Amino acid sequence: MEIPGIRIGHATDLRGATGITVALCETGAVCGLDVRGGGSSLRNPTVALPGHRVEKVHAVFFAGGSSYGLDAGGGVMRYLERRGIGFPVRGIRIPIVTGAILFDLGVGNPRRRPDEAMAYRACTRARAGRAAEGSVGAGTGATVGKYFGIRRGMKGGVGTANLRSGRVRVGALAVVNAFGDVRDPETGGILAGARDSARGRRLMGIEAFLRRGAASISERSPTPEVAQGGDSTTLGLVATNAALTREQCCRLATASHVALARCLSPAHTANDGDLVYALSNGKLRSNILELEALAVEALTRSILRAVRQARGLAGIPSRRDLGMD
C-alpha cells in the first residue's frame, strides 16, 4: 500500500496455516469502518466510528485464528508502546489499535493461532511500498467457495492495489476468506470458488445453487455446509493521502463495499464477517466522490489479486495449482 506514513507488515505460520497482517500509521491516521457481514469479530471498533473522543488510530490489524486472534492486538500495542507512540493520557501514551479476525481454524493446525509474539514480528517487518501478496500474513489460511465445505473450496489470500489521480493516492488491501466464489467483474467468470469434488477442477457457481434451492441438489452431491456460519469473511482496508474527517472515512468505507459486491458471489452473507476500514493520512483536499470511485476500483483489484497470487496450502488448491492461470 503506497500511501505515505502507512507501512504494511506480515507474519506467516505455514505449519499452522495462519498469520497476521498489520498496517502501521505511527503518526496517527483518521479511521472509519463499515461492517456488512453477519459474522464479524473485532477489537476496539468504536475508535473507528463517529462519537469516539479519539480521532486517530496508530494501527489496524487483520489476523487469522478466529476470536483467538484478537489477542494478537496486544503485540501491536507493545510494539508501538516501546516506540513511544500513542494517545496521551495523564502522562502516558496509549497506542490506539483496532482490527478484525477471520476464521481459518479449519485449515492447518487449529491449535496454532496468531498471538502477541507473531503480531510483534509483523510490526518489525512492516515496510512502506508494495506489500507481499497471496498466501501470507492474515491470508495464509484463507479459503473461498465453502458452500460444500472447505475441502471443495480454493485458496484465498492477501491482495493489494494502488491508484492515483493527480497528487491524490488511494491504496487498498484485501484479505479474502469468503464463503462465496470470487468472480472477475469484467467477464463474470469465476476465478476461484466451490469445486465439483475435493480433487475437481470444475467450478460449480454457488449463487446458482442458492437460487435453485437445496431440493435441486443431486443425490450425488454432498450436503451443503451452509449451516456452519461465521467461518468466512473478506476484510478490506482502503487508505488515502487526502484529508478526511472520521465521518468521511466511514463514508469511504461504506462506498468501498461495492468492490465486495462486484467480486464476491454472494457477498455480505450471514456466514461472512465482511467489513472495510478506511484510513486518511494526509492533508490534500479532494473530491469525496472521486475518492470513492478510486477506492472501489483499488479494493476490487486487491480482491482479484488475492486469489490470483495465492498458493495452495494444507491440501487446499489455488488457481495456479489447478492450472487456471
Image (cartoon, rainbow, N blue to C red):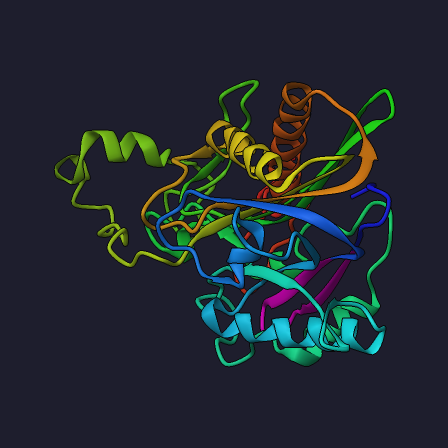
Q: Nearer the viewer, residue 242 or 234?
A: 242
Q: Is residue 31 above or below residue 150?
A: above
Q: Residue at x 60, y 61 (%)?
A: 98
Q: Quadrant of the N terminus?
A: top right
Q: Nearer the viewer, residue 4 or 72?
A: 4
Q: Residue at x 59, y 67 (%)?
A: 18
In the rendered image, is residue 15 in sight? no
In the rendered image, is residue 97 in sight? yes
Farthest residue, direction left: 215
Farthest residue, direction front: 90
- The answer to whether 184 appears left or right of 269 in the picture is right
Q: Residue at x 66, y 32 (%)?
A: 301
Q: Quadrant of the C terminus?
A: top right
Give the extent of the magenta segment: 8-23
Q: Is residue 6 above or below residue 102?
A: above
Q: Is residue 22 magenta?
A: yes
Magenta highlight: main SS: strand
- The answer to whether 116 appears left or right of 49 in the picture is right
x and y percentages locating residue 262 in the rendered image? 50, 27
x and y percentages locating residue 42 in the rendered image? 49, 61
x and y percentages locating residue 320 in the rendered image? 64, 44
